[in-house]
Image (tube, coloured by chain):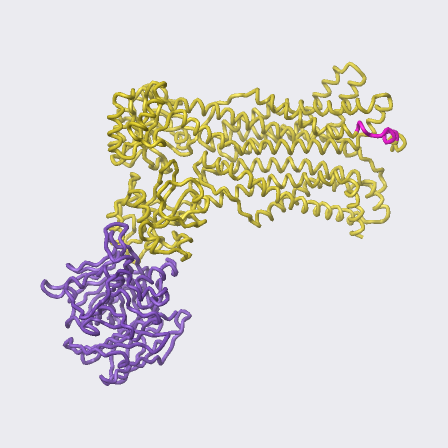
Chain colours: A purple, B yellow
Amino acid sequence: MNVRLFLSVLSLLAGPVHAQGFAGLGTQADGFAVPGRPAVFDFPADHGPHPDYRIEWWYLTATLDGADGAEYGVQWTLFRSALAPETAVGWDAPQLWMGHAGLTTPDAHFSAERLARGGIGQAGVTAAPFEAWIDDWAMTSAAEPGADALSALDLAARGPDFSYDLSLAAQGPLIFHGEAGYSVKSSEGQASYYYSQPFYSVTGTLTLPGGTVPVTGTAWLDREWSSQPLSDTQDGWDWFSLQFADGSRMMGFGLRDRAGAVYTSATWIAPDGSTISYPDGALRLTPVARTDVDGRDIPTGWRVELPEQGLDITTTPVNAHSWMDVSFAYWEGPIRFSGSHQGRGYLEMTGYD
Amino acid sequence: MLWLALSTLLSYWRRHPGQLLTLLAGLALATALWSGVQAINAEARASYDRAAATLGQDQLSRLERPDGRPVPMADYIALRRAGYMVSPVISGELRRDGARLRLLGIDVLTAPPQAETPAIAGGDLDLVEFFTAPGLLLMSAQTANGPLPGDLPPIRLSEDVPPAAAITDISTAARLLGQTDVSYLLVATEQPAGLPPLANATDLALTVPQNAGDVSRLTDSFHLNLTAFGLLAFAVGLFIVHAAIGLAFEQRRATVRTLRALGLPLRTVLAAFSLEIAGLALISGLMGLVLGYAIAAALMPGVAGTLRGLYGAELTGSLRFDPLWAAFGLAMTLAGAALASVQAMMRMARLPMLAPANPRAWAQASARAMRTQAVAALALFGAAVLFATLGSSLLTGFATLAALLLGAALALPAVLGVILRLASRHANSAFGEWLFADTRQQLPGLSLALMALLLALATNIGVSTMVGSFRATFIGFLDQRLASELYVTTQSTDEAGRLIAFLADRADATLPIVSIDTPLAGAPAEVFGMADHATYRDHWPLLQALPDAWDRVHSGQSVLINEQLARREALALGAPLTVTPGLTLPVAGIYSDYGNPSGQAIIGIDLFQRTFPDVPVTRFALRVTPDDAAALASALRDDFGLPADRVLNQTQIKRFSLDIFEQTFRITGALNILTLGVAGFALLTSLLTLAAMRLPQLAPVWAIGLTRARLARVELWRSLILAALTFLLALPVGLMLAWVLLAIVNVEAFGWRLPMQIFPGDWLTLLALALIAGTLAAALPALRLARTPPAILLKVFAHER
């Protein structure tokens, strides 16, 4: 598929990535619902799609250790983008779907993309029983009856030269970012609904050109939906999910603004799932190493500081070339870090065109 | 030195502008016809390639249902959910308001990269508009300006979309065509890792990509035909050039002798001549290209019409300029000029330096040369017979034609010589004897021009006989095939039910017509279901049939096939034909089906409905007393409420079919006339050449008392006689040509053989044309002769060499 074609489709997806580049599509709601305060969630329905909102995603990243001793990273994402705030059955349905799958090894990065229209069954999400799918890629609930649908998942995707098949079991509760799930994205007030399941343990198999690799590890699922997540001047974002040795976690992002300072936000997650949200400015993100990736200058090493938690670490990528070579390309891959804390995590960087 | 020689040689043309013009015009005409035809062919081929490349059909395999019905959406989703990269297309024809448009509904979200449409990939499209109702239609400007069905979504122009078609989102196509199931699936070349082969995962039939498509295969014959015409025209043009160059060489013998005597080496003289010819060829080649482009542009709509009528191939009626084409055309001109001048150059090289310059030497062809030609002609006739009997391809068909024509041309001087010698025995006056003897003596000089005339006339006779035979057969065929008085199409099966009730006591018979596009013997074809009625039993144009063919067909035991299918697959009566994977029937009859490029089979309507239960019955043939047809047609429109374009009477359809037919052969007619024109011009050139050289022969006749006016009249008569004789010889050649066209080329190209008919009326017209050409060609030289001052004639005796 042609890049320009999907840039324009994805301007509708309004992934934080490109929203600004497309005539402010990220900032206008055009009849779509807009997140409001206080955020009230209704599960399992809210695990499913929200067609009244323009964009939504089911975003899973996993840091894995292979039986061969190597580190691996896996990404599975399903984006929903609405052309109109409604659903329909048949070719006319105004909901578009996009899947991204990534698999990172220390010396290679595989990526694949799928696109589909809603209304015909090729892609979609059902809340109960929970399943998110596009083609043969699927994230399916394997939860016990009565448990949260996301507490156990089967996950599969396949690209031209790789595939993976993972089982995930949550070791903690869902957590909510910002004000109980209402996550502000700019000083102008653009916001999204945002919750995560950061406590998965993982077992499964990766299939690579060289053969299959059994893996174990941890995973993190993000759920987010909105209709106007970015302000006009925001170029892209740098997003971190970090796992510390004591079982606590941290989510932090910085939204880069052409007009001014980076807008940051962070959520500190205790091992029991209790959270502390930090407003703009509490988290400091500073690039410390850069890599030429696919002709672009990408900051692949970062200093991450959250003084209120005594955090001051430097991250390094497992593979500096974790480049998602899809319709709109971005960097996404597993990282390690050292400093005040040791551990692993995932980094996503968008908007480095 | 070279420059001096060149300027000396070139000064000749300043004194003979008429000859210069002839040379330039000859080369330009030859180039023009050749390159014009090439331009048409190239444009048509490019058009097929564009059409074949639409949606990557030239690179992508497809999945279709073996029975030709749409693929259920659930089957498509099942394949996607199994991981296969297949992309749906909903295609169909939108017919409304008497206009039709082919819709290609694609899913850009899943379409493989090869299926990418530049218009969409270009990014100038508003994708929200494209995806959401009412949607957008992408089509070429030509399609957008043509007649279109009404109530279409907004149109965006894109020249990459083939003619008469629109590309749109699959949702828009689904809405406009009222079809949710998928017409076919495009299969991406690269499938994800670790999946079982696609063929194991589905019952759908996988078809491999069609390179350049069926259209290209079908139309090959047409383009070969055009190319043959182009080459013929080029050859005829070269006759002119040969005459003009030969004359120019001869008339400059004295100059060359002087140059050589002054010490100029032969090599320099030859180089100067070569440069001169190359320069002239270049100039006339460029003129020819301009002219060729104009010819191609003028003929293009006719060609487009022909291809649409004959093969259903859609062509843009426009022409693009291709530098490669121009370069090739110029190279052809240069090669042609070199060929035409090689004889003259060789003579120049062999010319003894101090030999007397004698223009007559050129015209005095030896009897030996004529014998050699006659032998070559016989060999070519033999080859023609061989090709005709042994060959079985289009190419050998055309080889037969070429050998026949060339042989006839080479035989012409010898045959004319014999006729004139025989005729001179009956001359009963001295003047008559002189006339025949003089004519015979002129033959070598005129022979090339006469050969050109023979070729043009023979081609004309052959092609017009073929077209005429075709037309006569076609009209008879239409009368048989369109036996019913009215043909009605309803919009739905509900409406069809009401129609049958409406017609119960108004029509003598209401015969359903059902058909489906489904491959037969691996090629696109149609299967019809036919009702059991005397209309068909009495009239259907069966070429061969078993005695009880109709009973066998209507009881579902046999199938009827058209001649094309029978010939292509060598199916004789009784041979089995696989209609669908589960249905194989013996052939009970073969019927003629002119004007249809693809195969066709007919089965009984009961069997048809059992085999293809989803095909709706919406078309009907109505039998009614012919006098009541008009009244019933208006009742159907006014009382029953059918739109006017859904009720057609027999006459309308026949007229429409004949229009298509005439359109089909318009291009042939145009090329015929052009070739004849070129031949006439060749004759004029030759006569002009001879006129200048013949003074030494005419002066004595004038001196013994014949007036110049009489001499001029004699010249005219001579030209007429030669034209008439050539015509007489062209007649059998033309008829043989027609036979080859009908019995070999047509069978190979279209799959049908037509009975040959002759049209003496057309011959008379052509004879008149030949005589007019002869008169016109001789008029100018004769007029000059009549006005030659006596002093010049007298000088002949003074300067006798």
Please identify the residue farthest to the front as the structure is shown: B638
Residue at the left extreme, as displayed: A146
Quarter assignment of residue B245? top right
- Percent position (x, y) of residue B149? 37, 40
Residue shown at 54%/31% (left/top)?
B387
Residue B334 in percent (x, y) is at 66, 45
Q: Which residue is drawn at 25% across and 49% down?
A: A90
Q: What stretch is highlighted in magenta?
A: B785-794
Q: Which of B74 and A86 is in front in this view?
A: A86
The residue positioned farthest toward the right in the image shown:
B798
From the viewer's perspective, tell me whether residue B329 is left or right of residue B184.
right
A112 lies above or below A233: above
- The quarter of the picture where the C terminus of chain B appears is top right
Q: Quadrant of residue A312?
A: bottom left
Q: Work out whether B511 lies above or below B233.
A: above
Residue B787 lies in the magenta stretch: yes
Quarter of the figure with residue B519: top left
Q: Most prominent secondary structure in the magenta stretch?
A: helix
Asked whether the viewer can see residue A107, the reply is: no
Residue B537: give x, y in percent of width and height.
33, 20
* Left or right position of B752 against A88: right
- Residue B409, image x, y percentages: 64, 29
Q: In the image, is residue B571 above or below residue A201?
A: above
The residue depicted at 28 percent of the width and 33 percent of the height is B583
Residue B42 in the magenta stretch? The answer is: no
In-front residue for pair B227/B142: B142
Q: Is residue B425 left or right of residue B128?
A: right
The answer to whether residue B711 of the structure is visible from this angle is yes
Count the labels in the image: 0
